[in-house]
Image (cartoon, grey):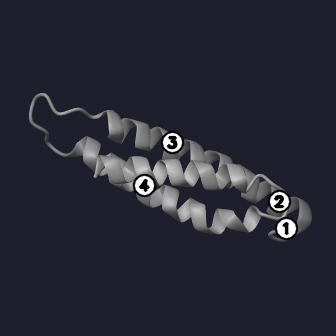
Amino acid sequence: MGCLGLTAGVLSITGVLVALIPFLNILNCVTLPVAVCGAVLSLADLVRQKQPGQGKTSAVLGLVLNGLALLIGTVRFLISLFTTGGFV
């Protein structure tokens, strides 16, 4: 689950950075749900019981990337929503 969360984090942060380009903010409607799913998967992997010696690096990185994508994407989405009155 940690690898899936990390993959979702990489995809969502890439999508959010592309969505910073004007007129591509609609991409946030796809990347923000992916970031939420990735954060849930990473958090579930961190919480579950693991045997000694198994790493948590991918889960932690996935949680950080998904959190960053959620923060940037939500702020960008709200700024564009309140300044233009739409998704542009």
Which circle, 1 or 2, is nearer the viewer?
A: 1
Q: Which of marks 3 and 4 is nearer the N terminus?
A: 4
Dot 1 lies on which element?
A: loop
Percent across and percent down for residue 21 are: 81, 54
Q: Name the residue under label 4.
A: 38
Instruction: Tell me, yes or no, whether the two marked residues, 4 and 1, touch with CB atoms within 8 Å.
Output: no
Q: Name the residue under label 3.
A: 65
Above or below 82: residue 71? above
Describe residue 61's horizontal placement relative to residue 1 as left or right. right
Residue 18, located in which quarter of the rendered image? bottom right
Q: Which of marks 2 and 4 is nearer the N terminus?
A: 4
What residue is rendered at 24% in x and 43% in y? 47
**Separation of marks 3 and 4 at Cα, in angstroms:** 9 Å
Describe residue 47's horizontal placement relative to residue 21 as left or right. left
Percent across and percent down for residue 77 are: 73, 59
Instruction: Tell me, yes or no, whether the two marked residues, 3 and 4, touch with CB atoms within 8 Å.
Output: yes
Q: Which of marks 1 and 2 is nearer the N terminus?
A: 2
Residue located farthest toward the bottom when viewing the structure as drawn? 86
Dot 2 lies on which element?
A: helix
What amino acid is at disc 1? Answer: Val
Q: Name the residue under label 1.
A: 88
**Separation of marks 4 and 1 at Cα, in angstroms:** 26 Å
Residue 80 numbered tag: 2
Density class for disc 2 (Cα within 10 Å; few <14, some 14-19, many ≥20) is some
Dot 4 lies on which element?
A: helix
Residue located farthest toward the right when viewing the structure as drawn? 84
Instruction: Tell me, yes or no, whether the two marked residues, 1 and 2, touch with CB atoms within 8 Å.
Output: yes
Q: Which of marks 4 and 1 is nearer the N terminus?
A: 4
Percent across and percent down for residue 39 are: 42, 51
